[in-house]
Image (tube, rainbow, N blue to C red):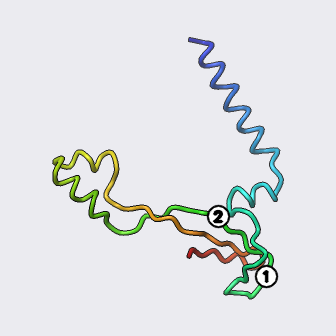
Amino acid sequence: MWIIWLFLVVCIVAVLIGAINRTPEQDAIINYGHKNVAMTCPHCNAQGEIRTKQVKLKRGLSGGKATAAVITGGLSVLATGLSRKEGSTQAHCGSCGNTWTF
């Protein structure tokens, strides 16, 4: 049993050390994605400072999930939830800090 605890502690320490040793550029890539030099910020008109990444946003009510919830007596809601998730692109300007999705 103590081996499992030791393994967990070693894993947690490794993750913390990895997070401490990241550069600001690596943090920006993790948080906002890679730079997209072709985009222009709609707020400050800066070009070449925009980072983009794919995100999933919750949008409205899914008809299929609502139907499944009625058929299963609500059990499917516990596993899946009712909102549908759509793929979007999140953009972030490194100059002014504005973030938007499209």
Q: Amino acid at mark 1?
A: Gln
Q: Amino acid at mark 2?
A: Lys
Q: State yes or no: discs 2 and 1 in contact (Cβ < 8 Å).
A: no
Q: Which mark is residue 53?
A: 2
Relative side of 56 to 50, left or right: left
**Quadrant of the drawing holding the C terminus:** bottom right
Residue occupying the point 60% across, 63% down:
54
Residue 3: image x %, image y %? 63, 13
Task: Sort mark 2 into few (<14), some (14-19) or many (20+) by Cα contacts within 10 Å.
Answer: some
In the image, 101 versus 10, the foreground residue is 101
Residue 85: image x %, image y %? 43, 61
Residue occupying the point 51% across, 64% down:
87
Relative side of 21 to 97, left or right: right
Relative side of 97 to 100, left or right: right
Q: Quadrant of residue 93?
A: bottom right
Task: Sort mark 1 into few (<14), some (14-19) or many (20+) by Cα contacts within 10 Å.
Answer: some
Q: Earlier in the sequence, mark 2 or mark 1?
A: 1
Residue occupying the point 81% across, 59% down:
25
The mark total stands at 2
The image shows residue 17, relative to residue 64, as above or below, that is above
Residue 71: image x %, image y %? 16, 51
Disc 1 element: loop
> What residue does disc 1 label?
47
* Whole-number angstrom distance, CA of label 2 to CA of label 1: 17 Å
Disc 2 element: strand
The image shows residue 3, relative to residue 92, as above or below, that is above
**Quadrant of the drawing holding the N terminus:** top right
Q: Which mark is residue 96?
A: none
Residue occupying the point 68% across, 72% down:
92
In the image, 27 versus 90, the foreground residue is 90
Residue 36: image x %, image y %? 75, 72
